[in-house]
Amino acid sequence: MNRRAWPLARLALALFSLLLPALPGAVSAQNAKPPAVAGADLRALYATVPDILEGKRVAEVSCARCHGANGISTASGIPHIAGQRPPYLYQQLRAYLRGTRPQSPMTGAVRFLSDDALVKVSAYYGSLDPARPAAAPKPAAKAAAPKDPLAAGKAAAEACGGCHGESGVSKTPGAPNLVGLDPKYFIAAINAYKSGQRKDDTMKSMVAALSDADLANIALYYALQKPARAGTPAAGDASAGKAAAGACAGCHGDKGVASDPANPSLAGQDAQYLATALQAYKDGSRKDETMKGLAAALDDKAMKNLAAFYAAQQPQAPKVRKPLALSELTDRCDRCHGINGNSIDPVVPAIAAQRADWLEDVLKTYHTGARKSAAMAAMTSVLSDAEIKDLAAHYSRQTARAITFIPLPAK
């Protein structure tokens, strides 16, 4: 049998079922039948070959310009819809029609379509062969095996161990603890040494060759180490320093644990380093107008007392997630979207063989909240841009499989 004719032949042999919301006044292609799945919100509708052909005619006028012939998109940022789950397509088309999805070219495309037309278009695209998976990139001739960020960070941080301790817990007076710092602050501080904004020739030469990826990996490595106080002495009076610390709590927390990632946590920090930093803010060798104003009123004794107070506090790990392997991330996605992205839930989209650029864009819109879904917001909130890109590429390379929903007879 001709592969192109297969979808229509399949429908000629057995009715194609669409599990659609039971909306007041909704028009089906044929009479409604008993629900095929449990749930008060869905009912089974059946599309015959003439319905599919009518859906094809509507699709050629309203959809093909963007989504391509037979639902295979050739345009960047436009998804494939061939072989997509018909109930999902129908729900999304209705969402554009009702205005519950943001204004887009889709809004105009569905504006004058009836509910009956939406049913038939959804059935038509659901009957088509899905897109073929994207080809995996050819490996570079001598490409090194990729390292996970944590291992890469540990390797890059080896040069720091002599002063800051192997795991970032300093035992050298004057060398700061590197544990307990949010990566955002850590990266900003290192970049300040690279640019010369922070004056330290040794540090400037040490970090000069580090790339942005190196810095991100090192920051992640230290953020995930067990926090501990610096193993160095404190010359000041911690009790006296506690009273002076009240002015610092707004940015650095009551006990030196900052809630804003842009501000450093001071708990457990080496006391000599803290006192030296305060002096640098006071004399202007470190540029920060807020810190300069606060440090201006402190003499050497007050600085040592303040440093001793923070050095005695217990540091806490920043809220940083250990990166998951791609296989761990896809396991989470497959729970809803099906094995390798082939959804068997009628209202959850299949994402196998979908365009990578479109998947990446959609994941980012959920990540930022521009597209609303409590479940997807929770799933994407912890993803980095690199993880989003890897997930999109992974699913674009999976083989998409068509599915027919079959209602079971009543017992």
Image (tube, rainbow, N blue to C red):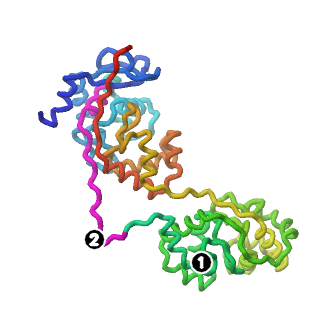
Examine the rendered structure and indicate whether residue 151 appears above or below residue 52: below
Residue range (magenta)? 119-144
Drawn side of residue 106 relative to residue 72, left or right: right
| Quadrant location of the N terminus in the rendered image | top left
The residue at the point 34 percent across, 40 percent down is 342
Local SS, label 2: loop
Examine the rendered structure and indicate whether residue 402 appears above or below residue 217: above
Q: State whether the magenta stretch is mostly helix, strand or loop.
A: loop
Q: Is residue 123 magenta?
A: yes
Q: Which residue is mark 2?
A: 141
Amino acid identity at mark 2: Ala
User: Taking the image as drawn, is residue 290 in sight?
Assistant: no
x, y (%) of residue 98?
Answer: 43, 29
x, y (%) of residue 188?
Answer: 59, 69
* Quarter where residue 11 is shown: top left
What label sits on residue 312 in the rendered view? none
Drawn side of residue 304 relative to residue 166, left or right: right
Residue count near mark 1 (Cα–Cα under 10 Å), binned few <14, some 14–19, many ≥20: few
- Cα distance between the residues tagged 1 and 2: 34 Å
The residue at the point 51 percent across, 40 percent down is 375
What label sits on residue 161 in the rendered view? 1
Local SS, label 1: helix
Residue count near mark 2 (Cα–Cα under 10 Å), binned few <14, some 14–19, many ≥20: few
